[in-house]
Image: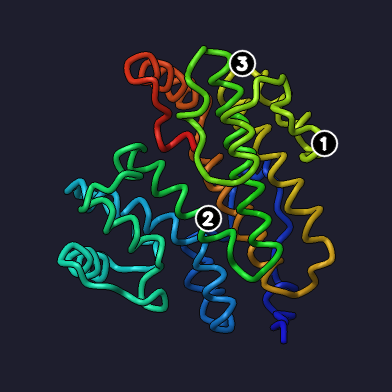
């Protein structure tokens, strides 16, 4: 039976990507909304917060001191799980997500997939595959949509700057394979992706900050259209969480920082022909 959250959803404020202030943040959502969710819905929301655990795991494996407290696990828990996996132990998915266990184990064993991909790309691929297998249709489709949009934009940039497209794509879906191998202008995906024209127009945008804003507007539109019949359910709360994340990020990102990001990106790609993780 699907849980209904009449009181929580009815109290949500109207949001716009143009908002310059937020009454809630991603951290607030976890403290104010999360405790009222059913255990199944908490696990669903966890799929979003695991992105912070991904970054924390990478930082710990690289012996960096940064730690983002917005993840699902404390620093002490992650240290304990990483140590256990390094020693060859196994952890059930109910305790620690199986994709993180697979990534950490592969990281220490230096298995073939780990050697072929940058660690952050390998982790992103495992994360999206894990999230897309969730039983909630809307959330699974959201992760697939987001992966596709990100990959399409990366593929278009790779073509423009004569990079190796295949090495830039993250994931193992049919769309990912088409982006890696097709030489057609639309990657042979126009019939499959009804939003591909919009993505390709975004890809033509020169200024990085404007490109990112257009991409977020596309994501915002997709969420609203695909959740319009989700009344008082966890899907509506999931959309709210995604939207406050976007607004929170844009409040912190000014144009000058965006131009600096672009210069750093081009410099990095010239030196390494790799896409930095923060642009995925």
Q: Is residue 154 above or below residue 77?
A: above
Residue 127 in the image, given as x and y percentages of width and height: 47, 55
N-term mark: 3 or 2:
2
For this view, does 275 lie left or right of residue 87?
right
Q: CA distance from mark 3 to mark 2?
A: 31 Å
Residue where numbered disc 1 is placed: 191
Q: Are marks 3 and 2 in contact (CB under 8 Å)?
A: no
Q: Residues within 10 Å of mark 1 (few under 14, many from 20)?
A: few
Residue where numbered disc 2 is placed: 129
Q: Is residue 267 above or below residue 195?
A: above
Q: CA distance from mark 3 to mark 1?
A: 26 Å
N-term mark: 3 or 1:
1
Labels 3, 1: front one = 1
SS type, badge 1: loop
Q: CA distance from mark 2 to mark 1?
A: 23 Å
Residue 86 in the image, given as x and y percentages of width and height: 18, 62
Looking at this view, is 224 or 277 the one in front?
277
SS type, badge 3: loop
Labels 3, 2: front one = 2
Rendering quarter of residue 194: top right
Looking at this view, is 239 or 46 the one in front?
46
Quarter of the image with the N terminus is: bottom right
Residue 273 in the image, given as x and y percentages of width and height: 39, 20
Q: Residue at x 47, y 72 (%)?
A: 31
For this view, does 217 lie left or right of residue 45?
right
Q: Residue at x 54, y 83 (%)?
A: 39
SS type, badge 2: helix
Q: Residues within 10 Å of mark 3 (few under 14, many from 20)?
A: few
Q: Is residue 54 above or below residue 41?
A: above
Circle number at residue 123? none
Residue where numbered disc 3 is placed: 206
Q: Is residue 96 above or below residue 195?
A: below
């Amino acid at each position: 039976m699907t849980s209904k959250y009449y009181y929580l959803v009815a109290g949500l404020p109207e949001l716009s990507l143009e908002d310059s202030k937020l009454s809630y943040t991603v951290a607030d959502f976890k403290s104010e909304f999360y405790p009222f969710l059913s255990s199944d819905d908490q696990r669903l929301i966890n799929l979003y917060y695991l992105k912070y655990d991904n970054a924390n795991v990478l930082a710990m494996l690289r012996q960096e001191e940064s730690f983002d407290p917005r993840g699902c696990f404390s620093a002490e828990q992650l240290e304990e799980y990483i140590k256990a996996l390094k020693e060859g132990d196994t952890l059930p998915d109910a305790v620690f997500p199986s994709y993180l266990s697979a990534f950490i184990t592969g990281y220490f064993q230096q298995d073939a997939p780990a050697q072929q991909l940058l660690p952050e790309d390998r982790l992103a691929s495992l994360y999206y595959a894990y999230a897309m297998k969730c039983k909630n249709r809307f959330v699974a489709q959201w992760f697939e949509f987001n992966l596709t949009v990100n990959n399409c934009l990366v593929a278009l940039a790779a073509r423009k700057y004569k990079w190796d497209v295949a090495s830039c794509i993250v994931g193992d879906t049919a769309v990912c394979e088409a982006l890696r191998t097709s030489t057609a202008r639309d990657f042979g995906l126009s019939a499959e992706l009804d939003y591909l024209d919009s993505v390709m127009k975004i890809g033509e945008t020169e200024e990085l900050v404007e490109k990112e804003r257009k991409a977020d507007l596309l994501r915002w539109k997709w969420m609203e259209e695909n959740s319009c019949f989700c009344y008082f359910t966890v899907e509506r709360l999931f959309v709210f969480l995604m939207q406050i994340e976007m607004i929170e990020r844009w409040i912190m990102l000014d144009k000058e920082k965006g131009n600096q990001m672009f210069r750093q990106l081009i410099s990095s790609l010239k030196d390494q022909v790799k896409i930095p993780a923060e642009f995925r």
